[in-house]
Amino acid sequence: MVCRKGVESIDILLTLLYLFIFPGFIFLFAFSLFTEYLDRKIYARMQRRVGPPFLQPFADLVKLSAKEDVVPENAERFMFTAAPIIGLAAIFAAFLYLPIVSSTGLHSFNGDLIVVLYLLTIPTLAMFLGGWYSGNVFGQKGGMRVASLLFSYEIPFFLTLLTPALIEGSWKMADIVTFEITHPLVFIISFLGFVIGLIALQGKLERLPFDIPEAETEIVAGPLVEYSGRRLALFRLARDAEMVVGAGLLAVVFLAGPEPIVHLEPVYLSWIVGALVFLAKTLFVIFLLILIKSAVARIRTDQMISFAYKWLIPLTLVQIFIAIIVRFLGGI
Amino acid sequence: MGIVKLPIGPQHPALKEPENFTITLDGERVIDVDIRIGYTHRGIEKLMESRTYTQNLYLVERICGICSYAHVENFTQNVEEILGLQIPKRAEYIRTLFLELERLHSHFLWLGVAGHEIGFDTLFMYTWQDREVVQDLLEMISGNRVNYAMNAIGGVRRDVSEEHRKKVLEGMDYLEKRTEYYKEVAINEKTILARAENVGILKPKVALKLAAVGPTARASGIMVDIRKDDPYASYPDIPFDVITTNTNDVLGRVVVRVLEVFESIKIIRYLMGHLPDGEIITKAPRKVPEGESISHTEAPRGEDFHYLRSNGTEKPERYKVRTPTLANLPAVAEMLKETYLADVPIIVAAIDPCMGCMDRVLLLKKGKEKPGELIDGERLRRYGIKWYAERGWKA
C-alpha cells in the first residue's frame, strides 16, 4: 500500500510537471516568445535589417502588462476582456494534446486530432468577438474580415490535416505518428497536403499575404485597434502560441512529430530527445512560414476567398482522393 | 454591417501626413469618398514676403522634404528671369544633376512606400536601403541629405570635383543593377500584380480633363513632361525619352517610375560625361526690379509651378506655389470610385502624395456651414483667448 501510494504521488507530480512546466504552460510561454523573436529576427535579416534583441518579445510583454488598463467607453466590457483570455486558454489547452515528448500527449484518445483542430478555431472567434465588441469602426471592420475569411482557410486546413488520418485509418495523433515513422512513404504521398497546410496555417495566423484582418495601411490594426495594456499582451501571446501550436500540429501530422523515439533510461532522457526532435520539426515549419511572409505582398479579401475556393480546396480534394486510392489499394 | 463611414486620416498609418479621406463603405466596396485637405498649412507664401531673396532660397527649399530641389530651382529661375541673369553652363549642368538625383531618390522612396501600402515590407526595406546610395551622393556633393542648399541666385554654391564625378558614376552602376531587379519584381511578383493590375483606373480622357500631372498622367498614356515640353536648365542638350504606359492603373504608375529611374541614370551619365568647364556662379544684385515671372519644372511627382511678383525691393511682393500633389488630387477622387477598401491606400499612394507641400489657404464653403472669413493676427489671438475662456480653460 505504502509503495503504491508513493508511485501515485510521483505520477501526480509528473502530470503536474507536464501540465505546468514541461512541456506545459511555462514551456509554451517561453517557446512562444522565442518563436516571436525568431520570426522578427529572421524577417528582419531577410529585409537587411538588424532585428530585435533576444529578450525583446519578453520585454514587450512585460511592458504591455504594466500599462494602464483602458476599456473604451463604447466597448462591451465583459466580452472585450473575455476575448483574449478565451483565445489564449484554447491555445494552451490544444497544446497539451500534441504529442511532444513521446508519441502520446498528456492524454491521447481516438479523435484528439479533431479536438485540437476545434480548439485552434477558437482564437479566431475570440479575435472576431474582441473586434466586434470594441465599439470602434476599424475594430468592427476587422472583426468582419476575420469572420468572412474564416472558411477560406479553415476548410482546407481541416481537410488537409485529415489526409494522413485517412491513410492510416485513425483519428488518434499517437497512431498517426507511429504509423508514419514505420511507413516513410506517407511523407511523399501527403507532401501536397503539407504545402496546403502551410498556406492555410499562414491564413489562420493572419500573416502575410493573408494579414487582411489587421492590414495596417487599411484598417490600422483591425480587431486589435482598441486593445492596449494587458489585454493586448494576452492577444499577442495567444498569436505567438497559436503559431507554435499550429506549426507543431503540422509537424505532428505530416512530419511524425517527436518520432523517431529513442528509448533511453531513465525515461526522461528519451523525453528530452523526443522534445528536441519535435522542436526541430516545429521550427522548420515556422521557418517556412517566415519565408512566405517575407516574399509576398498582402492580397485583398476577394482575392483570398477566390484563391481558397479555386486553388486550395480543389487541391485538398485531390490530396484526399490520393489518400483514398492508396487506402483502397490496400495501404502502404 | 450595412453602410459605414470610415475615416482614413487625419491620423492613419497609411498616410504619412495628415489629410482626411472619409470613405463610405458598403461591405468592402467604396461607395463615396470625401477628401478634406488643409491640415498642414504652414503659411510659407506669406512668410516669403517678409524675407529677402537670399533668405527665401532656404525657405522655399523647405516646402517639401523630398522634392526640395525642384522648388529651389523654380525660385531661382523666377528671380533670374526678372533679373535677366544668364547663369554659367557648368552651373546649369550641376543643377540638372541635382534635379535628376532628386528624382532618383524620390522614385526609390515611392517604390518602397507603395510596397509598404500593399504590405510588402521587404520591398520597402530594400528600396530604402538603395536610396541611401543617392542620399550619400547628394551629401557628398552638397553636404546635405535632404535640403541641399545648393542653389544661389546666379548659379550654384558648390562645384562637382573629379572625385565626385567618379563616385556618382559608380553609384549609377550600382543603382542600375538594383533597378533591373526591382523591374523584375514589379512585373513578375504574383501578389504585386494582383494588387496593382486594374486598380485605380484613370482613363486618358479623364486624366486630361482633371489635369493630372507627372507619372500619374504618363501612366494614362499622356505625353506630358515639362523637361521636354518646356525645357529648362540643361535639358535641351540632353537626349532622353519620356516614359508612358497605357495601362491606366497602379501597375502602370509603378512601371513608369521604375523606367524613369533608368532614364534618370542615363541623364546623369550624360551630364557627368559632358560637364563643361568654367565658373559656377555669376554675381547677382540684391534688389530685384519690378516684374512678374512664372516658372515650372518637372518635379519627381509632376509639374511644380511657381509664380513671383517683385516690386524693386529686396523682398518679393507675392509668391505662389502650386505643387503636383494638388493637381493630382481630383484624379485621386476619380480613381477611388468603385474600388475596394483594400485598394484605397495604394491608390492614394500611387500619385506619390506630398500633403505638406500642397496645403495653401483654404476657404471652406460646404452645405449650410457659414463660409470662412479672413481675419488678421490680432483678431485671431482675441478669438483664441475667448474660445478657451468659454470652455473654462486658462490661456
Image (cartoon, coloured by chain):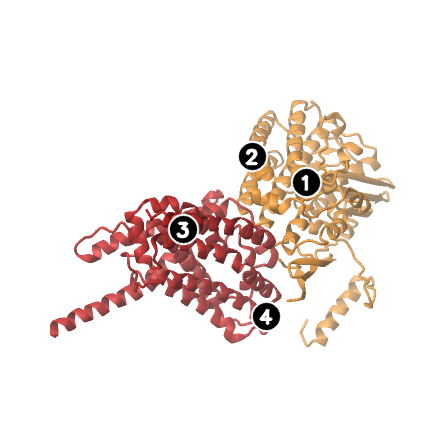
Chain colours: A red, B orange
Question: Helix, strand, or loop for circle 2?
Answer: helix
Q: CA distance from mark 3 to mark 4?
A: 48 Å
For label 1, the crowd category at 10 Å Cα-Cα, with few meaning under 14, some 14 to 19 and many 20 or more, is many
Both on one chain, marks 3 and 4?
A: yes
Q: Quadrant of the C terminus of chain B?
A: bottom right
Looking at marks 3 and 4 on the same chain, the residue that comes earlier in the sequence is marked by: 4
Return the x and y of residue B86 as percentages of the image width and height.
79, 29
Q: How many marks?
A: 4
Q: CA distance from mark 2 to mark 4?
A: 45 Å
Mark 3 vs 4: CB contact within 8 A? no
- The answer to whether residue B313 is visible is no
For label 3, the crowd category at 10 Å Cα-Cα, with few meaning under 14, some 14 to 19 and many 20 or more, is some
Residue that mark 1 sits on: B252
Mark 1 vs 4: CB contact within 8 A? no
For label 2, the crowd category at 10 Å Cα-Cα, with few meaning under 14, some 14 to 19 and many 20 or more, is few
Please report, as a chain letter, where disc 4 is located: A
Please report, as a chain letter, where disc 2 is located: B
Residue under the image location 73 percent in, 71 percent down: B385
Question: Helix, strand, or loop for circle 3?
Answer: helix
Front label number (1 vs 3): 3
Residue that mark 4 sits on: A135
Quadrant in the rendering for residue A25: bottom left
Vertical comparison of A316 with B5: above or below: above
Q: What label does residue A324 carry, if any?
A: 3
Q: CA distance from mark 1 to mark 4?
A: 39 Å
Both on one chain, marks 1 and 4?
A: no
Q: What label does residue B181 carry, if any?
A: 2
- The answer to whether residue A253 is visible is yes
Front label number (2 vs 1): 1
Vertical comparison of A256 with A137: above or below: above
